[in-house]
Amino acid sequence: MSEAYEHLHRSVRSLADEDEAARIRRIRTDRWIGYARAEAALETLEDLLTFPKRTRMPNLLVVGPTNNGKTMIVEKFRRAHPVREATDAPDGTASMPVLKVQMPPGPDECRFFGAILDALGMPHAPHGRVAAKQDAALRVLRATGVRVLVIDELHNLLSGSVLQQRRLLNLLRWLGNELQIALVGVGTAEALRAIRSDDQLANRFEPFPLPLWIDDDGFRRLLSTLEAVLPLRRPSGLAESAMALRILAASEGVLGEIVSMVTKAAVLAISSGVEAITMRVLDGSGFVRPSERRRVAV
Ligand SMILES: Nc1ncnc2c1ncn2[C@@H]1O[C@H](COP(=O)(O)OP(=O)(O)OP(=O)(O)O)[C@@H](O)[C@H]1O
Ligand SMILES: [Mg+2]
């Protein structure tokens, strides 16, 4: 209790006195870690939301490798703009500024509109007619005032036939025009490839890359932030060169792996009583490099 825990964020200091089990539970709970690129993405998304309606709405494509924080960003954006129930609105209509759907695998118009209706909480017959689903989806999208439609896993487009891909790309273009809403695609480089196969879409979707992490100031700041929110009683110095380079190499520059590696190490730091992430703790935490993991997987 006497320690000031100066290595921790102010709001985390009091947690450092909790017992082992409580702290391990906290460490394992998902939390949002802010970093410059994500904050910039969120700002860009906010801009889309306030963009006045016009025939050519700007679209965004959040693109990056798998497990690198794309969904976390659009989820945070969606949470910041929750549904407003009809009873809370001055004009008595429910509103939903941001709608997020996933591009279904093997997509066609029917599945795509089905995904939109699911996200809107609208019941529909799985094998119902496309036209009926399209009408229903458009009606509700208009009625709830959706301004930004986020389509995660956009690379799933490519799992359809070339003809299907073309139809869906046309549909996206049409949807944006018809409703005058901004579209936000989220996906891997494959998604970018799919969008670029349609000239008219290509010049409407501004790519927002979330590249793999490299050893730069941003990476070191990310490690400092992580250290400050994990309630260990002693400082670890994660952002110091030797540690940082070790973490970067083992995580292969993927954000999800960085978070997972540091989290695993933090748990061991507590359960072993070391209370700091040291090189030995990193070695002992049982983290396996992603490429290694793929190799041993059967
Ligand atoms: N801002 C963040 N704060 C804390 N943890 C994060 C953050 N962004 C990503 N992570 C960690 O990385 C993991 C992967 O993130 P996310 O699911 O957003 O990746 P993705 O880019 O959408 O991957 P995929 O292309 O496979 O869907 C998360 O489960 C979380 O553990
Ligand atoms: Mg994702």
Image (cartoon, rainbow, N blue to C red):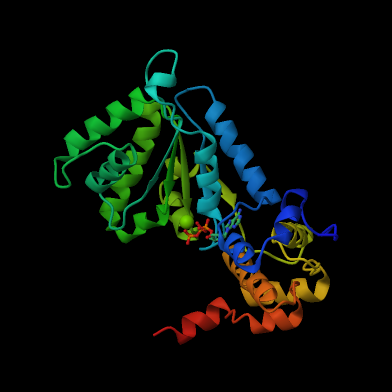
Name which residue lies at 37% across and 27% down: 179
List x then y, in percent, for residue 53. Answer: 48, 22
The vertical placement of 183 against 242, above or below, is above
Quadrant for the C terminus in the image: bottom left
Name which residue lies at 64% across and 68% down: 20
List x then y, in percent, for residue 23. Answer: 64, 63
The vertical placement of 278 against 49, above or below, is below
List x then y, in percent, for residue 213. Answer: 67, 64
In front of the other: 176 or 196:
176
- Residue 223, quarter of the rendered image: bottom right
Name which residue lies at 26% across and 53% down: 163
- Residue 201, quarter of the rendered image: top left
In front of the other: 37 or 109:
37
Horizontal side of residue 161 vs 46, given as left or right: left
The vertical placement of 51 against 254, above or below, is above
Residue at the extreme top: 91
Horizontal side of residue 130 vs 79, given as left or right: left
In front of the other: 137 or 55:
137
Name which residue lies at 61% across and 38% down: 44
Quadrant for the N terminus in the image: bottom right
List x then y, in percent, for residue 66. Answer: 51, 63
Tally of marks: 0
